[in-house]
Image: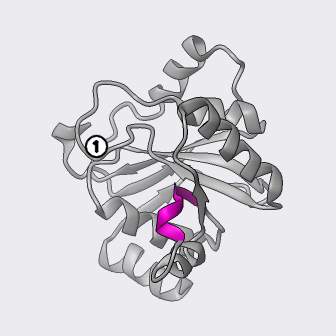
Amino acid sequence: MGFISKFIYFKLYKWKIQGAFDKNIEKCIFIVAPHTSWWDFSLGVLVRNILDLEINFVGKKELFKPPFGWYFRWMGGAPVDRVSKEKKVAAIAAIFESKKIFRLALSPEGTRKKSKRWRTGFYYIAEAANVPIIMVAFDYGKKSTNFSEPFYTTGDIEKDLPKIQSFYEGVQGKFPNQF
């Protein structure tokens, strides 16, 4: 899959990857933004294959039942009960605890539509699981996937969130008016 993914990503799409990810980081949260199109998922799969990384996601437990549950697990999915916000953070932190490797990809916007503010669950999950946040930007304007250095939360979201969001300044989504 790596060869085919490289051909599509680099030769056909003519994209590049900036920054690097340390494969020794076995547990982290990738926050991927801007999320303005379903194309973001396919780009993410290509990048995952190129880097030969296990990258995971969480979904409602109903997705993991037959007939397609096997597919979502194969793609790196982990089921989560749809419970209150606080319990969801603890449930996802428990997934980190139970796995040797778990790199969770999330969209902080929580939707492909224009959002006035980010959801902050990723921050609280990173704190509860004691894992770094890696910012990932799909910049359609520059045809580039950008990776940040690991960011460790300080416990002060008011101070940390502007630092995290600054990574995305100047980044253009597939549909720029939605970011």
Q: Is residue 128 visible?
A: yes
Q: Quadrant of residue 23?
A: bottom right
Give the colouring mode of the picture: one colour
Q: In the drawing, does residue 32 fall left or right of residue 95?
A: left
Element assignment for label 1: loop
Against 152, residue 158 (above or below) is above
Residue under circle 1?
Answer: 172
Quarter the C terminus occupies: top left
Say few, some or many: other residues with alpha carbon within 10 Å of mark 1 (under 14 / 14 to 19 / 20 or more). Answer: many
Q: Nearer the viewer, residue 62 or 117?
A: 62
Q: Which residues are magenta?
A: 56-64
Q: Is residue 20 visible?
A: no
Residue 122 picture location, percent across and down:
57, 36
Q: Quadrant of residue 77?
A: bottom right
Residue 64 picture location, percent across and down:
53, 70
Residue 161 picture location, percent across and down:
53, 21
Q: Nearer the viewer, residue 46 or 126?
A: 126
Q: Looking at the image, how many numbered discs can be counted on the residues?
A: 1
Against 83, residue 124 (above or below) is above
Residue depicted at 28% across the width and 43% down the height = 172
Q: In the drawing, does residue 106 fall left or right of residue 124?
A: left
Against 50, residue 168 (above or below) is above
Q: Quadrant of residue 163?
A: top right
Q: In the drawing, does residue 161 fall left or right of residue 54?
A: left
Residue 148 picture location, percent across and down:
58, 42
Residue depicted at 24% across the width and 52% down the height = 174
Residue 58 forms part of the magenta stretch = yes
Residue 65 forms part of the magenta stretch = no
Q: In the drawing, does residue 106 fall left or right of residue 76?
A: left
Q: Nearer the viewer, residue 111 or 2?
A: 111
The amino acid sitting under disc 1 is: Gln
